[in-house]
Amino acid sequence: MFMFNNSKRNIRLTTIALMIATFMTAVEGTIVSTAMPTIVSNLHGVSIMNWVFSVFLLTNAVSTPIYGKIADQFGRKKIFIFGLTIFLIASLFAGLSKSMVNLIFWRAFQGLGAGAIMPVSYTIIADIYPFEKRGKILGLNGAIWGIASIISPVLGGILVDRLSWHWIFFINIPIGILAIIAIYFFFNEKFEVKNYNFDYLGMLLLSLFLFAIIYVVKILSSKNFDGIELSIFINLAIITFIFFVRRENVFINPIIPTKLFQNRTFVIQNAVALLVSGFIMGLEVYVPDWTQGIMGLGASMAGLVITPASLFWIIGSFISGYLIKKINVVYSTLIGLFLILIASFWIINLSINAHYEYFFVISAICGIGFGITITNSTLVSQKLVSKEDIGVATSFNTLCRIFGQTFIISILGIVMNTKLKIEILNTPKTSLAMINRLINPKYAKDLPLKSLYNLKSVLFNSLNWVFLFLFSLIIFSMLINLFNIKKKDEIR
């Protein structure tokens, strides 16, 4: 049973604490990239530095659905504070690391802690806000991730230049402690622990499956992968998935109840969230490549052109709540997807000489679409399940978004690299090394003037393939959403 002291002051302070924790973990996911050259020069280990990023993502994704289940069984407050405490302890020891291996070890624990923060935050929001107000808060929380992705490179640069790389981890500690104190004193949850047997075998099988499938994505995204290694992890993913499904069908208290997938709307909205999350990541990664490499903008301005997506995300989340009440979730999601479709169609029709101002408008349109579709998926995940399963449903939605970003960005990397190779082979006086220099304004000025147009053409044509793929993702998202169009909708 869930009971709360719902005073406006407590709700407000709890919400602020959730936003702070969300911002902190969102920044931590990307701030390390800015400091990595300095970290490598101090700790060495360049051959394994990619694991600093990968292990955080792996443990974050693997732990997310497990925290959702535990929060449903043992309470949100305890699990949120537990996850945040692990994150802060790991941040302290990551900052104190004396070798790359130590840093990777503590980054794994950071990911384990971060896995609790996003899904349990969304679950707490569902507990303290009525359905009609929830969309605005979810949208604000979602927009924080976008804002963090823009701020984190700048913040990382300042911390490394003014202090040292250790402070990209140490800075979390005072901020996180404030969030813990606020949640402890102002989130007054009275929770009756459910005396169910916990599904430890299901947890193990799910963890192995998620680890295997994400590692498969990592292998595929590498330039030279080992076919035997790939085969081993594909088979591991298949076997653990089969045994996990069998386990969940018979266990009385499953980690992810299979009854959730009997609801078509739930399945479709989470599939849309997965695809749109991949689109979001593609936009964040490849628009800066376009604006820097083709338009010649600096890194700061390149990041600024996608800022409207985060700001207009909030507007989209407000619209989401209104649309669901006035029409239904299916048509509401279609409106959001249609806006993203317009923006992506605009991108693939831009010329090589297009002005960067276009991307401000494109980004704003995308932001409204993201706010509608992603907020819809979270609201639906929470509304269509019983109170006892809100944590599980929310964490599954979060997992879909994480997996969408991870899987689709890897596919986009394959698309980009394949097209680059084709273009370079067919374009004289170009090379991959020159393309890498073109994307960095610091080195682009040293490239031969005679080669600049050819290099920009190679990059432009390759990016067009990427955005054409993203355009097709939104088309596919709209099509699967139409599978639910004739079904009487549960959300009104």
Image: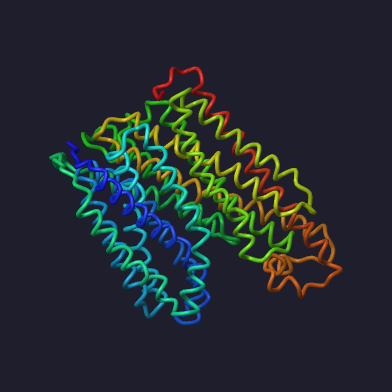
* Quarter-of-image position of residue 353: bottom right
* Quarter-of-image position of residue 165: bottom left
Task: Look at the picture and state if 173 lies above or below 114.
Answer: below
Residue shown at 74%/57% (left/top)? 459
* Quarter-of-image position of residue 176: bottom left
Task: Look at the picture and state if 85 lies above or below 383.
Answer: below
Q: Residue furthest right?
A: 450
Along the viewing direction, whichever of 194 and 430 lies nearer the viewer: 194
Number of numbered tags placed on the structure image = 0
| Residue 374 relative to residue 415: left or right | left
Residue 98 in the image, given as x and y percentages of width and height: 37, 80
- Quadrant where the N terminus sits is top left
Residue shown at 60%/36% (left/top)? 339
Residue 415 in the image, given as x and y percentages of width and height: 65, 51
Residue shown at 42%/75% (left/top)? 100
| Residue 246 relative to residue 363: left or right | left
Along the viewing direction, whichever of 150 and 76 lies nearer the viewer: 150
Residue 124 in the image, given as x and y percentages of width and height: 29, 44
Task: Look at the picture and state if 472 lies above or below 188.
Answer: above
Residue shown at 42%/47% (left/top)? 237
- Quadrant where the C terminus sits is top left
Colour mode? rainbow
Residue 6 in the image, given as x and y percentages of width and height: 22, 41
| Residue 339 relative to residue 138: left or right | right
